[in-house]
Structures are given as C-alpha cells and as structure tokens.
Image (cartoon, rainbow, N blue to C red):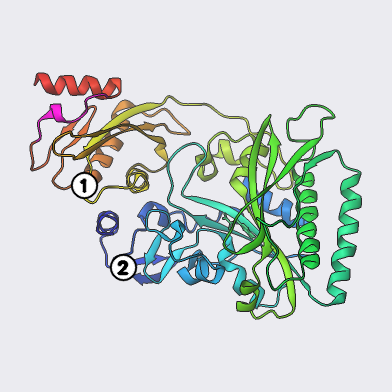
C-alpha cells in the first residue's frame, strides 16, 4: 500500500484528485496516475468516426429495441463495481495491483457491469451500455489500461406472458440462424457445474440461457459474418464455453474463429437474482453480456496495436467512416528502440503492474511493450533484482535515440523515487543512489545488453 501511495505521490503532488471536474481527497488507497486521468475525458466510444464509436453504433443498430446508454461517469464506488455483483471480499480484482482507486470510496470502473444495478433500477428492461473501463495491466500490443466495453442486458417477466415472450423470441432467432452460414459449437445451457440458480425454475433458466445464446449468435453473425477471413463460402465458426462470473449463473464465454485462431470476445450469463433484487425489479429473470470493443475492433479492422485507438494522427482517424468496417492500412512501422533497466526491488516488493504504470506515466504511448527479461535473487542477502526491457516506439514518427534516452531517464527518475535507497541500473545511464552496491551483485545471467553493462561495470 505504501508503495502505491509513493507512486501516486510522484505523479500527483496535490492532496486531491480531480476527475471530470470533481475533486476527491486522496488517501492511502489512491493509486490513479496522471496518465490514466488524461484518458478519462477522451470518450472514444462517443466519436462517430472512431472505430470504437463505429462499432458501438453497429451493435446498437442490431438491437433497435434496446435503450442505448453511453454517458455514465467512470467514477464508481467499490460497492457498485464489486459488492452489488456479489464479488467475494478476497477477489483479486479488488486489489490495488489490479484496479485504479481514487480513494477508499471511489474507483474507476473495471467493467461496465458496475452499472447493472442502477440501470435495472431505472426500470429499463432491455439496454446496451457502452463505456470506458480501467484495469491495471501489463504493457503490450493488445493490453492497454483503458479500454471499452459494451454491456447488454434483457429481463423478462417471470409470469406466463414473459415466458411466452421468451419462447416466441427464441423461435424467431433460431429460424434466422438456421438459414445462415454459421457453425456454432454449443454446450448445454445448464449443467451441474454451470447450474441454474436455486430461486429459478430450471426450465425458465434454460429458456433464458437459450435466448442469450441465440441473441448473441445473431449479433456475432451480423458483425463478423463474411469478414472472419475464413475463406470464400466458409462458415463463420463460434464456440460457447462454460465460464464463471460472480454475478451470473449459468455463465459462458464466447469465442470466434478469426484468421484461423479462436478469440474470446465476451462473457455473459443469467443475471444473479440478488442483483435484480438489489435493483428492486421483482418477478423478473434475464441475461447480461459484456463484450470488449477493442478486441473486436482489432479483429475486424486489422488494427495491429491497441495504442492506435488513442492516436490523434489524421493518418489513423481519417481511415474510418461511420457505418463501415474497412481494413486498416498501417501507415508505417517506425523503428523500435530497446532500453533495459535493472534494479533491486524495494523491500515490500513491486508488482509488475506497478512498474508498468510507472513506465506508462513517465513515457506514455511511446512505450510499445515492457518485458521482464531477467530476475535474480542474491544468494546471501536474498534481495531480489529484476531487469525489464522497454521497447520505445512511436506510432507516428521515428524516435531518435536521444529522445528514447530522455524517456528512459524519466522512467529511471520515477523508479528512484520508489526505490529510494536502491541501486538502479540502465543500459546507457548509470544511476546510483545513497547505497553503493557492488555491480557484480546485480545480474549473473542476463540479456546481452545488460550483460554487456554488467561487464562494463565490473571493469570500472
Ligand atoms: N464484466 C465481465 C468482465 O469484464 C464480463 C461479463 C460477464 C459481463 C458476464 C456480463 C456478464 O454482463 O453477464 O469480464
């Protein structure tokens, strides 16, 4: 906890955090960084010509009778994000290493499910909700700490009229799918390991799960049909997998075959009755799903790097047109510039996500990926040292080595704030702090760059 406090203190010196014009007092849980804060106002899903906005509109058009919502603040309470959805108290998603906390009472939502209770409580019975969500994560071409999800949900009345509505809708959707060029690998709707809820009539749970599957299969057909690189005349392939979420039972994940690989695109299930009870919707039963928009957009548009969604380069933005899905033409791949940094871990250890956030906060979207390339425990002192390789690459121009060095120096200087008394080594600048540690204690078996440095240091 102290470590995260230190991280946030280095990036946000004031005693309050301002998010979308609101001020929140900091406390020991504050771990949000200024680089994350700068993303909160971007709202890519509301831009009509941005791939994320285009995909939102396409999915909304598929569900014309659903209420489309897209203006919910990302600031939620941990109760909304976790407790209302029955997340256990020890769920890893709650931890400071996984989520961004503004303080102990407010956080950035980690998923759009955080708005399920309030949306059902408004009396809306079928809805789509699109929003930016935030998760602390590693850095690479397909992970970014901010991304977009769309939550969809539909509830039916538990009485005979609701059940009739379900059966009729199921028949309509099944007829449409029967004519389509799609192969669906299905699993049973309800099983002992993926059970109906005790308060549900198992027959009704089956009908709801079937409606969920039919509804999503036809959405997937609409979005991916004819675009999945399967080859001329080849069917679209979709598979259903048993899953677990704290707020649904039964629960499923869906994968789509794209370019010869299975790709997971969404999670879903029959909404837990306790969630509907919290929302005070009596006598109802229904389903919900949450899909990752970047994941789908990267597949559909062939966008190779998730950072591109945040680009303001006209060479990226000008390629997209509302209502259309066209293959993205990369404008250029600029050279990569690798820099290593190795350091003794602070006594209280440092989570890889803490390091990634530090790097992201110091060097922003110039960081393409961060890899742990070596770890070493000193045999006598048992202290741990790690070596990370950071790949600096701009998406819109060539970075000079001097620029990459300047970015790396920023990373090192942030690192020195965290590892106050520790030796921090980089491949081009050697920085020591108060304590002098013999260089040979650093890395014994390491990457060529670091090894060369280790040798250089030994020769000094
Ligand atoms: N919120 C889940 C996630 O982010 C996805 C999800 C699963 C949403 C099941 C749902 C659901 O609505 O019913 O991983």
Bin the neighbour count of mark 2 within 10 Å (Cα to Cα): few under 14, some 14-19, many 20 and up. many
The first of marks 1 and 2 along the sequence is: 2
x and y percentages locating residue 16 in the rendered image: 31, 68
424 left or right of 18? left
- Magenta segment boundaries in residue numbering: 437-445
Query: Contact, CB < 8 Å: mark 1 with mark 2?
Result: no
Q: Which mark is residue 346?
A: 1
For the stretch drawn in magenta, the main secondary structure is: loop
40 left or right of 235? left
- Taking the image in four quarters, ligand 1 sits in the one at bottom right
Bin the neighbour count of mark 1 within 10 Å (Cα to Cα): few under 14, some 14-19, many 20 and up. some
Picture quarter containing residue 370? Answer: top left
Kindly give the residue lying farthest to the front in the view shown. Answer: 192
The residue wearing badge 2 is: 26
- Nearer to the camera, 421 or 59: 421
Q: Is mark 2 within 8 Å of ligand 1?
A: no
- Nearer to the camera, 279 or 428: 279
**444 falls in the magenta region:** yes
Q: From what the image shows, is residue 65 above or below residue 357?
A: below
Dot 1 falls on a residue whose secondary structure is loop
- Nearer to the camera, 101 or 203: 203
Residue 50 in sight = no
Q: Residue at x 57, y 38 (%)?
A: 316
x and y percentages locating residue 324 in the rendered image: 73, 43
Give the quarter of the figure containing the N terminus: bottom left
């Amino acid at each position: 906890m102290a470590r995260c406090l230190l991280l946030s203190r280095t990036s946000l010196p004031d005693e309050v955090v301002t998010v979308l014009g609101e001020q929140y007092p900091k406390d020991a849980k504050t771990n949000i960084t200024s680089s994350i804060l700068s993303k909160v106002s971007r709202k890519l899903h509301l831009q009509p010509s941005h791939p994320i906005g285009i995909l939102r509109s396409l999915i909304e058009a598929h569900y014309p009778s659903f209420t489309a919502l897209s203006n919910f603040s990302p600031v939620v309470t941990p109760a909304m994000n976790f407790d209302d959805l029955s997340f256990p108290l020890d769920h890893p998603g709650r931890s400071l290493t996984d989520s961004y906390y503004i303080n102990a009472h407010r956080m950035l939502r980690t998923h759009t499910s955080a708005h399920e209770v309030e949306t059902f409580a408004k009396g809306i019975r079928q809805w789509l909700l699109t929003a930016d969500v935030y998760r602390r994560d590693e850095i690479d071409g397909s992970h970014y700490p901010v991304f977009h999800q769309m939550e969809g949900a539909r509830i039916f009345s538990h009485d005979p009229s609701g059940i009739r509505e379900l059966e009729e809708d199921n028949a309509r959707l099944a007829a449409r799918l029967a004519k389509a060029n799609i192969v669906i690998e299905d699993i049973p709707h309800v099983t002992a390991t993926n059970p109906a809820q005790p308060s549900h009539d198992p027959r009704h749970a089956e009908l709801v799960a079937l409606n969920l599957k039919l509804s999503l299969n036809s959405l997937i057909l609409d979005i991916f049909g004819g675009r999945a690189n399967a080859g001329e005349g080849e069917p679209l392939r979709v598979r259903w997998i048993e899953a677990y979420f704290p707020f649904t039972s039964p629960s499923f994940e869906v994968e789509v075959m794209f370019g010869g690989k299975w790709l997971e695109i969404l999670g879903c299930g029959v909404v837990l009755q306790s969630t509907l009870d919290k929302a005070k919707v009596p006598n109802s039963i229904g389903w919900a799903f949450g899909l990752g928009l970047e994941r789908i957009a990267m597949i559909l548009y062939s966008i190779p790097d998730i950072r591109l969604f945040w680009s303001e380069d006209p060479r990226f933005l000008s390629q997209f047109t509302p209502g259309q899905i066209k293959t993205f033409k990369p404008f250029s791949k600029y050279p990569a510039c690798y820099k290593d940094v190795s350091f003794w871990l602070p006594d209280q250890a440092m989570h890889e996500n803490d390091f990634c956030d530090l790097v992201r906060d110091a060097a922003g979207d110039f960081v393409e990926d961060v890899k742990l390339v070596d770890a070493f425990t000193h045999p006598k002192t048992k202290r741990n040292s790690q070596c990370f390789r950071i790949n600096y690459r701009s998406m819109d121009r060539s970075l000079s080595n001097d620029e990459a060095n300047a970015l790396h120096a920023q990373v090192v200087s942030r690192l020195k704030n965290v590892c106050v008394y520790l030796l921090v080594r980089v491949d081009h600048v050697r920085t020591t702090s108060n304590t002098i540690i013999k260089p040979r204690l650093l890395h014994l078996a390491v990457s060529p760059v670091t090894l060369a440095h280790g040798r250089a240091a030994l020769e000094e």
